[in-house]
Amino acid sequence: MSVLHVLRTALLDLLATMARPELRVIVGGGYGIFLKREWVRESASRTLIAAIPEARATNDIDLYLLPELLIVSDRLRPLAAALEALEYEVVRGAEKYQFVRALPGRGAVKVDLLTGPPSRFAGTGVKVDARRARPRHSVGVHAHPVEEAITLEDRLREVTIAGQTSAGADFEATVLLPHPFTYLMMKLHAFADRLDDRAKDFGGYHALDLYTIVATTTEIEWEEARGMALSHRDSAAVIRARQIVAEHFRQPTATGMLRLRESPYFERRFTIDVFMDVLSELFPPLES
């Protein structure tokens, strides 16, 4: 059984156990990119780049909680109850926002709970710092705030995930995917943070993810992304993203482009000139 199939089963288990279709979550990270890739393939949507990389393996499910769920935290009780019922264990040092579940014969799956930037919770009663956002009324789960996810709630895409739970029951549910602009912001920051991290492949997987995000962006999403980039051009998070692109993705010999070429998933058919042009248009260099 492939790692991606295991993740699908684990996510279906979680969604089926919650049994609350109105409690929709945003699936980010590598698995979210895989789901977008599958949506593009099934819908035959026209995208910015035809050459889309093969799906890369990951053992994490990044679930982004809409800030409104932490603000009105009673709505998160089914999620906390589902994690407990499925025997997820907390990750030491990241209690209540990172969980791991051992699947006999299939390894382990880790679930990370994340949310938008700390500023989103000003005046709401949610206690937030750099590591976690804690609902004012405890429900058993927290979320890790992502400073650069300034457009987390904007233009989300609904996709259906279907298959069998680990108990063999057929199940399908709707989840949300971040907009490509939101994804690019998060992955650019993650790449810069992992440049010197051997355990994280020196940012190589993030460079590949950036290419895949661009490659699976539809023409409509591209126009939306241009508008979002313009609206947030002067925000601190976008300014840092512009600096990262200028330093690491504007030239074929820049570090980010080298990391992309070093990836085991890299193929000569990739249209890297278009990739660089897209990043440079969304995140132009800062004026001198």
Image (tube, rainbow, N blue to C red):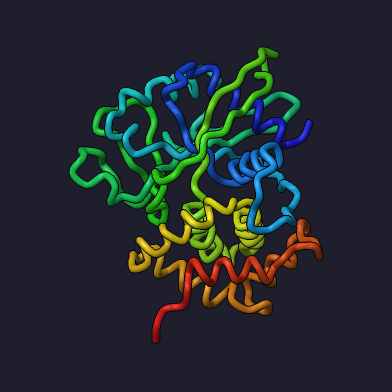
Write the residue at 60% across / 21% down: 172
Q: How far from the left and from the top, in percent, is residue 203?
A: 61, 62
Write the residue at 42% across / 34% down: 96
Q: How far from the left and from the top, in percent, is residue 278?
A: 57, 66
Picture quadrant of residue 109: top right
Write the residue at 24% across / 33% down: 136
Vertical arrangement, residue 155 with respect to residue 260, above or below: above
Q: How far from the left and from the top, in percent, is residue 162?
A: 64, 24
Q: Is residue 199 visible?
A: no
Write the residue at 57% across / 38% down: 61
Quadrant showing the C terminus? bottom left
Residue closer to the observer: 168 or 218: 218
Position of 182 with respect to 167 (left or right) is left
Q: Is residue 23 visible?
A: yes
Vertical arrangement, residue 153 with respect to residue 100, above or below: below
Looking at this rendering, what residue extends furthest in the left direction?
123
Q: How far from the left and from the top, in percent, is residue 14?
A: 54, 23
Looking at this rendering, what residue extends furthest in the right direction?
268
